[in-house]
Image (spheres, rainbow, N blue to C red):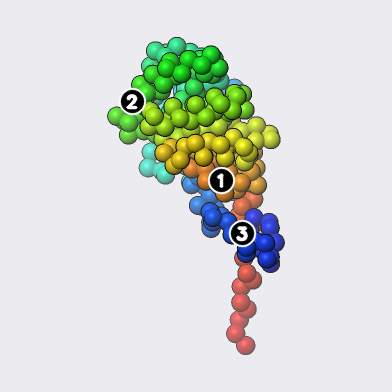
């Protein structure tokens, strides 16, 4: 017998059951997926198509360029998919005033998930008070507007001790989530970064992983990621649908 995750059932699996069940349906997996649109140069119509796709798939969120926020909010009205936007990408190196203005403007326009990139230069410089002050201000703005703050740390680019410190700061400012990277890399998926952040966060804030394909997405889910960033959510969900169908028991034939 083969389970939907492609692993054969056996004695070892029974001895070491997975603590987190796999998504039972395509819709359950879709509810974990964030769709970051970009970072390529995209027309307004291309972004609109991505937003409509996210809504049709029932994704958790779709992250659009700031200039397309009004369109995304309008198209997503009445759907289960939240409008999100990145602030400070790629290195978070804009001034605090500029980043806060952009984030607060997005909140005013109806964006419900702010993906705020930590100032990686300040983090590398170990200016932790600067980082915490900046994040505390945006956290307060998000809380006041009922929005989710997702702190993006670009984990592959920073040292392990800085990942731990960034996660601890995220907890102190009461961020909703800490995200390993804004966009999935070709090789991204479950790794030591996710396990480290999950251990440090201690359920105070969620962890957002990145996954280029289905197997990586399921691996993130098994590690307890609250969200999984996918640049090709349609392909991921189609693959999961096929795997679920292949694992389903054959339907009974007509009674004799």
Q: Which numbered disc, 1 or 3, marks the residue that appears first in the sequence?
A: 3
Q: Residue under label 2, please give it.
A: 141
User: From the viewer's perspective, is residue 107 above or below residue 236?
Assistant: above
Where disc 2 sits, the SS reads helix
> What label does residue 223 carry, if any?
1
**Are the two marked residues, 2 and 3, in contact with CB atoms closer than 8 angstroms?**
no
How packed is label 3: few (under 14 Cα within 10 Å), some, or many (20 or more)?
few
Q: Residue under label 3, please give it.
A: 16
Name the residue at the left extreme: 144
Q: Quadrant of residue 204?
A: top left
Q: Which numbered disc, 1 or 2, marks the residue that appears first in the sequence?
A: 2
161 vs 130, left or right, is: right
Mark yes or no: residue 76 visible: no
247 vs 126, left or right, is: right
User: From the viewer's perspective, is residue 230 above or below residue 135?
Assistant: below
Residue shown at 64% from the left, 50% from the top: 239
Residue shown at 35% from the left, 29% from the top: 142
Task: Residue 33 in the image: state x and y as whole percent.
Answer: 52, 42
- In this rendering, the count of numbered labels is 3
Where disc 1 sits, the SS reads loop
Name the residue at the bottom extreme: 256
């Amino acid at each position: 017998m083969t389970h939907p995750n492609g692993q054969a059932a056996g004695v070892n699996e029974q001895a070491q059951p997975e603590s987190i069940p796999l998504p039972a349906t395509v819709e359950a997996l879709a509810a974990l997926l964030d769709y970051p649109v970009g970072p390529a140069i995209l027309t307004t119509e291309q972004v609109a198509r991505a937003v409509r796709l996210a809504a049709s798939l029932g994704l958790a969120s779709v992250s659009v360029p700031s200039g397309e926020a009004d369109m995304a909010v309008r198209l997503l009205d009445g759907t289960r998919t939240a409008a999100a936007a990145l602030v400070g990408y790629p290195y978070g190196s804009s001034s605090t005033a500029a980043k806060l203005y952009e984030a607060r403007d997005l909140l005013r326009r109806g964006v419900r998930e702010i993906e705020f990139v930590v100032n990686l230069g300040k983090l590398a410089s170990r200016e932790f008070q600067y980082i915490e002050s900046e994040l505390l201000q945006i956290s307060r703005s998000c809380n006041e507007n009922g929005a989710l703050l997702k702190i993006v740390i670009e984990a592959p680019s920073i040292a392990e001790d800085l990942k731990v410190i960034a996660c601890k700061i995220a907890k102190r400012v009461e961020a909703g989530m800490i995200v390993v990277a804004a966009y999935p890399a070709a090789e991204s998926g479950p790794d030591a970064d996710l396990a480290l952040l999950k251990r440090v966060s201690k359920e105070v804030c969620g962890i957002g992983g990145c996954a280029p394909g289905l197997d990586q997405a399921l691996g993130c889910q098994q590690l307890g990621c609250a969200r999984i960033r996918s640049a090709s959510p349609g392909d991921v969900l189609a693959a999961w649908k096929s795997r679920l169908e292949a694992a389903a028991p054959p339907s009974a034939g007509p009674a004799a």
